[in-house]
Amino acid sequence: MTSDSLELKPRQATGPAAGQTSSILTLRGAAAAIAVALLLVLPALVATFNVPSVVGLGTQVLIYAIAAMSLNLVLGYGGMVTFGHAAFFGLGGYAVGLLYQHFSEQSAFLGLVPGSDSLAVALAVAMLVSGCVAAIIGSLSLRTSGVPFIMITLAFAQMLFFLFVSLKAYGGDDGLMMRRRDVAPFFNARDDINYYYICLGLAACWFMLTACIVRSRFGFVLSGLRQNERRMVAIGIAPNRYRLVAFIIAGMGAGLAGALMANYLRFVSPDMMHWTKSGELMMMVILGGAGTLIGPLLGAAAMVCLETFLAAQTENWQLYLGFILLAIVMLKRGGLAAILDRLPGARP
Amino acid sequence: MTPMLELRGLSKHFGGLTATDNVSLLVPTGSLHALIGPNGAGKTTLINQVAGDLHHDAGAILLAGAEIGMLPAWERVRHGLARTFQIAQLLPQYSVLDNVALAAQVRQGHSFRFFADARKNSGARDQAMSLLQAVGLSARASFKVSDLGQGECKQLELAVALATKPSLLLLDEPMAGLSPLESQEMIDLLTTLKGQVTMVLVEHDMDAVFALADCISVMVYGRVVATGNSDEIKADEAVRTAYLGEGDD
């Protein structure tokens, strides 16, 4: 809308915009429906074309998508550049690994908490632990902002990384192996296709949750804090309370993703919380489009697929991955979600 | 009657520089009190201390008789204090209506609500719309803030401040950067607000100040050198030499 139209009456000014919205809704609705349908029938397609490894690839995409969506809440919507998000991813993984280890040894963590091989219990514990640690890390690091915030979140994540490297009882450097995947109620999670559907369901839940949160009163305040903290204080908002809650929700999401990843790989190691993993999650969010709902999904899919594809072609795949990421981020501000937005009929 | 705002011996130092020097001020409920003075006299610093963006070194700030000097800025807002900024502070990616509705939402209570759509909060949206009508921005309700002119931003900031339902409104140069026409609109707007809300106005536009203020305080080097109504201030010899004579071209 140009400034020439400023004199229009409100009804006239909003008229064409309202028409556009409905056409976007149908176009986007159709694209979303196709994407959901593809995700739902992926295992069947895989069976038809006889490429079983794609189910695993899809599972990894979905798991990383949950982690990237959770990071997007703080990074994209909240404007908090945290460089330690993999800490929660790793904690979620270790929650699963530790519970399984104690279950198989018939022992108890610190002599108090018995082990478990139930997937539901493991996921709940992983989210709870990650959420609690996020509350601690968040309440300390949110006293700062900008570069100090980046550094302090990185420092906390590295502390946790070295803590788990030094925990020889739980594998130290080498990590923990799980002999079998955790068991789920009602159906067999040890089957890869079933496990894919579990991840798909949880990713869909996390997507809906994020969609709700960012449109809610809380999301309104969170996004306002990103845009102008001074303004928010001047209308009576205590900034860090809202930021901390977002940080905890994000930590829980990463914990969930980590727990799913540990179960998928049947392996956890300190590498899951290494700073390069934090960087990878950040890359997914920025590549896909920070502060958009669909961005982290696209980013996770692009990163996991590119990594797999390039690694199969050449040993120096990281070099080529770097070029592709650079090209997308530099050529198109707003990442893959912005490219989707440019499709005909989409939002101007 | 308890004054809406009372400052008692407020002082603030930045290193060796005294920004606010033992300022005491009484603003009766319902009045508009203007603060004038040359650049660097400490007017904005004083506003920032009252709003809580800066912490004073000594003295007390009483809002309707209650000490608020120790509260953080956001909590002072909950006690009925609102402010506008010299350079408009808005949420650039949100629409005009969203900016006001968010302030109205915060006024409704805490915002730890994670599920219902905030843009369907009809209480806050209706209130925001009527405030936009009051400041003359209702035709721009769906515009993005980044597409607004400077004058409209100032009007919008006023609507946002009013959405917090303040009993005391601090206005930091609401006419700065406005065209003569926009300034006149702002003066008209503030005139309609007079009596409904107590205001402290920092302004360089003398016509505006003399038209609006019930009481004027003149600040020089962080101190209040004179207080009185507009006729008294115009007549005050010390004020003329210290400020009006130098400030006018």
Image (cartoon, coloured by chain):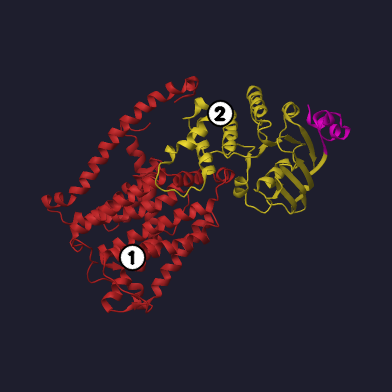
* Residue on which disc 1 sits: A93
**Residue B87 or residue A218, whichever sits in front:** A218
> Which residues make up the magenta segment?
B226-249
Quarter assignment of residue A103: bottom left
Magenta span includes B245: yes
What residue sits 41% from the left and 68% below the top?
A: A161
Taking the magenta stretch, the answer to whether it contains residue B25 is no
Q: Is residue B184 visible?
A: yes
Q: Which of the 4 quarters of the picture holds residue B218?
A: top right
Q: Is residue B71 left or right of residue A120?
A: right
Residue A130 placed where, x, y %? 40, 63
| Residue A246 left/right relative to A336 | right
Q: Is residue A323 above or below residue B202?
A: below
Q: Residues within 10 Å of mark 1 (few under 14, many from 20)?
A: many
Residue at 34% in and 36% down: A341
Residue B149 marker:
2
- For residue A99, what is the image quadrant? bottom left
Callout 2: helix, strand or loop? loop
Q: Secondary structure at mark 1?
A: helix
Chain ID for red: A
**Residue A310: % across, % down:** 26, 53
The picture places residue A106, in percent across and down from the top left corner, at 28, 79
Colour for chain B in the figure: yellow
